[in-house]
Image (cartoon, helix red, strand yellow):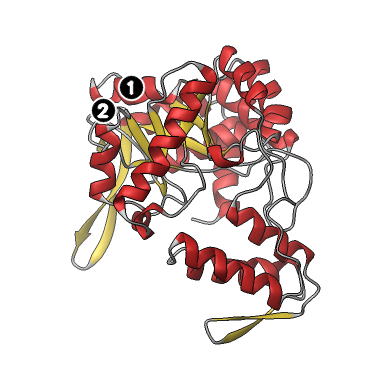
Amino acid sequence: MSEALVRQLGCLTLRIGLLRLFLTFACLFQVQKHSWHGLAVPYLRRRENCQFQILMYHRVNNDGDEIFEGVSTKDFAAQMEGLSRYYTVLPLEELVDRALLGDVPVNAVAITFDDGYQDNYEHAFPILKQFGIPATIFLSTGVIGRPGILWHDVLFEVFRKTIATSIEVDGRSLPLCCRADKQQALFAVLKTIRRLSPDARDRHISNIAASLGVPFNVHNGPKMLTWEQIREMATAGVTFGAHTVNHPILSRMPLDKAVQEIETSKRTIEDEIGQRVRLFAYPNGSREDFTEALKRSLKEMGFRCAVTTMWGLNGRGTDPFELRRMWLWDNDAVMTAFKLGWYKFASI
């Protein structure tokens, strides 16, 4: 269904005063499809248990970055207002525990951020406090409290600064003439890079920087959180999870090296904030980016759950080490609430 039609349905639902009823209905029933004489016929199926959604953010700012666009403070505030008004926003670990008991509240949501950008403190944190919303921030500890940026931010900076008009990617020449061109080319480059080991990845990024006429610099880029800011947020109820040290694609490296990345990240956060770390986020987080061996290792290290970037809902039957997440770009509180309900209702 098109975005425009979903918005029209949302406006209609609000206008006739049925938004809260629809959101409750979406928690109890789900659209399914049945094959009938070769046709996919939709029907309603009652859910056995309530499901919950996890929202994923990275950056919240008003920079208008053409390469790594964050959610604006205005949009983020509208989204949090919608969640506080129509949803039960709970800490991620509590939701995971309640799902296993079949005790997920109606319209339950958790909020997460990845990497540890400083604008999480400067812009998102005040809004979260304003609406009394809990959140989890997954930290890549190698760039927290010290100079440097993550490898993907190095690549993003190269694409921001280049004045080249094209780039060679897997034998193809891709244009770099406008924002859309750069984003499409960057997506192609990332697809290639994410298949490489960390060492090969860094060499490839250095070669790309040289080919695009941009000095390779691991220090220019977005500011990351400081440990002082993290401790302040932790005191105010924000939960912190591990996201490795250097944000490698864990499935592209030996298991012992991957475990070391995870353990070091976990231990560093625990030492800095004096709290146990039980939540983990896979870097990149697609199906190809983690393995069964990694999941077993996470359990052995004492983690309670792990989140992916795979789109979807979570419930009693969801593997807690393969939790799904979703993202929103809406700028209206009510439409945010409706869309989350719609995604749940129509997630065939």
Outermost residue on the left side: it is: 37
Q: Relative to 99, is 323 above or below?
A: below
Q: CA distance from mark 2 to mark 1?
A: 8 Å
Query: Which residue corresponds to mark 2?
Result: 49
- 214 or 67: which is nearer to us? 214
Q: Are marks 2 and 1 in contact (CB under 8 Å)?
A: yes
Q: Position of residue 308 (x, y in %)?
A: 40, 45
* Residue 87 visible in the current orientation: no
Instruction: Name the residue at 56% across, 70% down.
Output: 204
* Residue 182 visible in the current orientation: yes
Amino acid at dot 2: Asn
Query: Which residue corresponds to mark 1?
Result: 104
- 80 or 284: which is nearer to us? 284
Q: Secondary structure at mark 1?
A: loop
Instruction: Name the residue at 64% across, 73% down.
Output: 208
Please identify the quarter of the rendering in which residue 133 is found.
top right
Q: Nearer the viewer, mark 2 or mark 1?
A: 1
Q: Position of residue 162 (x, y in %)?
A: 77, 70
Q: Secondary structure at mark 2?
A: loop
Q: Position of residue 137 (x, y in %)?
A: 54, 31
Locate residue 39 relative to residue 217 in the image: left or right. left
Please identify the quarter of the rendering in which residue 113 is found.
top right
Q: Position of residue 318 (x, y in %)?
A: 27, 37
Q: Relative to 322, is 105 above or below?
A: above
Amino acid at dot 1: Val
Which badge, 2 or 1, is on the more N-terminal residue?
A: 2
